[in-house]
Amino acid sequence: MKGCQADFLSKDRDWKLVISESFCDLGELLEYCEIDPSRASFTGKHDFAFRVTRYYASLIEKRNALDPLLLQVLPDAREFQLVDGYSEDAVGDKQAMAVPGLIHKYHGRVLLTLTGACAIHCRYCFRRHFAYSESSVDYRMNGQVMTYLSENPDVSEVILSGGDPLMVSDDKLARLISSLNRIPHIRVLRFHSRLLSVLPERISVNLLEVLKQFSGQVVFVTHINHPNEISAHNQAAFRLLAQDGYQVFNQSVLLKGVNDSSQILSDLSNKLFESHVIPYYLHRLDRVQGAAHFDISKQESCRIYQQLRSSLPGYLLPTLVEEVAGQSSKTPVHCD
Ligand SMILES: *Cc1c(COP(=O)(O)O)cnc(C)c1O
Ligand code: SF4
């Protein structure tokens, strides 16, 4: 695999081809990272599949079984433990689904689960148990979703989520945008996507053309947890978005062993800023079954956050939040 970074990051490569070359086998990833497979606590079959892009894998430090990027994707035997207080639908998404594929929890904005697909599978993901086959939105937006949006003039923002909405092809996104353009009160289209950072090839000239077809404003929220996830390659992708006038925000999840230190988080904020990305939310872990080994107590979260606050300018401090089912917004964590 030596030198493969230079080959696979060629700008003109088709992103679907790049995805098809991802690691789907833990053994292969460990070999690539030169890590002894006996260091992995679990290598068998999982209900939540294993998937990592080669680009993300290239950022993992060789021979480091505790690498913070590796830990985010490494299946762990502890995922099988049932822990009190952890459930399959930790954030009440099922209850808030107004029509299949459309979650309406907060005032003025709805979230569409466009697809269940992702380019990398994060072990702590709160949607790991989500029944996507029953709740993916038809990209033509015929039927219930379209009717719901038309009949709810209070909704001015549509958030495309998933899975990862940028796993959907440009053609399908173009059709969706043309449907949304017919509803004048939808003024903002927001993408919640990790592809922006784990598959920089996705920000292609063609995608940028498709985005321009939306009649309102387009905004992005990406998902980066650790400064090592940022390299010249995804910085180039963020620069393309910035050049076209798009604002990109970042949300992170506070994860044990990955980013549970104010120094790491402060480096992350500074590196995001250099990349034209503004820190937005720092989430406490959603209490989803199989993710308890990533959790950090509230007291410890607050200790880290207070230190972070004292080391950053206000505009680089993400808001520490948690999601409480039934609340009208993400809930700020009160640390004082
Ligand atoms: C998080 C979330 C949003 C977005 O909340 P913001 O505070 O606007 O970022 C919208 N809808 C749902 C269902 C969400 O989970
Ligand atoms: S939805 Fe986001 S957090 Fe979950 S696996 Fe996909 S990329 Fe990771």
Image (cartoon, rainbow, N blue to C red):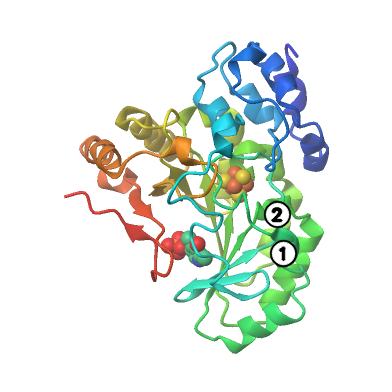
Q: For this rendering, which residue is in front, 63 or 152? A: 63
User: Where residue 160 sits: x, y (%)?
Assistant: 62, 62
Q: For this rendering, which residue is in front, 309 or 131? A: 131
Gap between marks 1 and 2, in whole Å?
7 Å
Residue found at x 43% / y 46%: 285
- As drawn, the residue found furthest toward the bottom would be 151
Q: In this view, does 111 lie above or below 209?
A: below
Q: Are marks 1 and 2 in contact (CB under 8 Å)?
A: yes
Q: Name the residue under label 1.
A: 136
Residue found at x 34% / y 60%: 331
Is residue 230 something that shows in the picture?
no
Q: What element carries label 1?
A: loop
Residue type, numbered disc 2: Gly
Residue 31 - label: none
Residue type, numbered disc 1: Ser
Figure quadrant of the N terminus? top right
Residue found at x 65% / y 51%: 164
